[in-house]
Amino acid sequence: MNSERSLPKLNSLTIFSHAWAAQSLVQLVFFHSVWFEERMILGYIFAALAILVFMFPGRVWLFGAMIVASIAYFVSQWPYVVNHILTDTFLSVTMLAALIWMVVYFKRRHVPFDQDLANAWFDKFAPVCGAAFAFIYFSIIVSKLNTGFFNLDISCLKGMIEEVHDRRLILSPLLSIASVEFYFWFFMVAETLLPLMLAIRRTRLLAFYFGVPFHVLLGLMGHWPFSAFMISLYILVAAPALLKVLREVAGWADGLRNKLVPWVSPSLGFACVSGFLLACALVIKPSWVWLIWTLGVATALLYATIREHIRHGLFAGTGVTPMWTSKPGFLWVFFVLVVINSLSPYIGLKTTTSVAMYSNMRTEGGTNNHLFMPRVPLFHIQDDLVEIVASNNEQIEELKTHPARYGYVGQEFDVYVNYFELRRSVANVEDPDLEITYIRNGEQRTFKRGESNEADPDLDVAPSIFLQKALYFRPVFKGDLSYCLH
């Protein structure tokens, strides 16, 4: 097979599916205790398919199977997932819906399922996923505009930098160049500009000059699952520009293959290189494998960006995936779900997995520390806070206190627990003699399992499976300070 015959297979779906499989593997490795140690069959299936897609990207049915496996696995873990994993699930459902739509479209028109299906599939879901990507940044920066984040005594940013100084000795000298105040305002300005630049086509690639290096740095600071997720979406946004560069690289690599190992097909050659990279995780730290892959991808992204700007100018808007278009049709409903998920704290719904990570934001119990976002309590479940006074069960007793995410090592703070979470916890305690003394709505109450005259009869009734999957509430620190939580 010569270079000319192998190059047409390199399309936007091939590039993105490889990146999406890579970030999926990062999530699986980082959170391996959930599925590997507990021997969850869904996790093993997901991992196997992600490895295959990483090695053989662009296969529509293989990538589709991986998407289905990822949805099944992540939904099985709801609600105990980090913020970006929930968004990952929304985007995966968008991709699956787009695939089904395209298959039906091709079948009705008797169009063969050839390479055109891959291109049509990517073109259908990419605008929605790209828009969600830009909105993630917008949601993150909006959530940080609160009095707690601006208070550098308790701000998540200060705690994050202090942790790097203590645990990441390689990065510590770099961060020592400037003060915490400098980094605070630098990141505030940069993270405000990022969603704006990504949303506007003519400035979309300009965001790459800060966003891509930032996520490499963030990964080095220990947040490589989130960074891998975001970098895969940078690849989606810059797929047209990146495709031009990778076609040239593929041509050069194919020529080298013909000289050295002509009996090896391009697909097998790529699979061998990718498999070797994955195998390196068995002998060195997986985070180093992530770094090797990320540095290569970051280099390609920045090179493609620079080349587009040199050839067409800084504001030509070339080389980017279309975003605000009617082409996805009803798929835009999934973007609306991403928006609603981020609005949850402001409308009285859940406070975890709402893309408000490391923000010091507090909206519970009738309090709102945001600088300008109003709190519109369409739902009141967020305000139903309980103070645990005592219990004869250790698991319930542990709900009385909670540590901050950064700083205050070894220190536990008194907290309120949401009544919904208390119901979830009580349902998970099998002790027939369970007793709890707690304060709710200013009134001290006592719960004894099996009693018929409970003040809150539903306390011993688990919320519905749907609500348990959809809602998740963090503990609320007592007092006026909103310490850092994820």
Image (cartoon, rainbow, N blue to C red):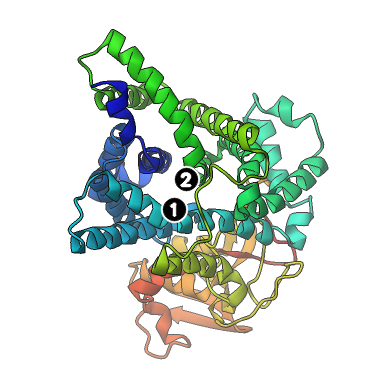
Question: Which of the two residues, 84 or 327, is positioned nearer the viewer here?
Answer: 327
Question: Which of the two residues, 209 or 83, is positioned nearer the viewer here?
Answer: 209
Query: The disc labelled 2 sits on which kind of residue?
Result: Leu
Q: Is residue 391 left or right of residue 68?
A: right
> N-terminal of the two: label 2 or label 1?
1
Question: Where residue 236 sits in the image (x, y, percent)?
Answer: 47, 45
Placement of the C terminus among the 4 image quadrants? bottom right
For mark 1, does the 10 Å Cα neighbourhood hold few (<14), some (14 to 19), or many (20 or more) residues?
many
Residue for badge 1: 126
Question: Which of the two residues, 445 or 22, is positioned nearer the viewer here?
Answer: 22
- The tag on residue 26 is none
Look at the picture and state if 114 lies above or below 466.
above
Question: Which of the two residues, 238 or 348, is positioned nearer the viewer here?
Answer: 238
> Is the Cβ of the residue at disc 2 closer than 8 Å to that at disc 1?
yes
Q: Residue at x 26, y 39 (%)?
A: 48
- The tag on residue 236 is 2
For mark 2, does the 10 Å Cα neighbourhood hold few (<14), some (14 to 19), or many (20 or more) residues?
many
In this orientation, does residue 174 appear? yes
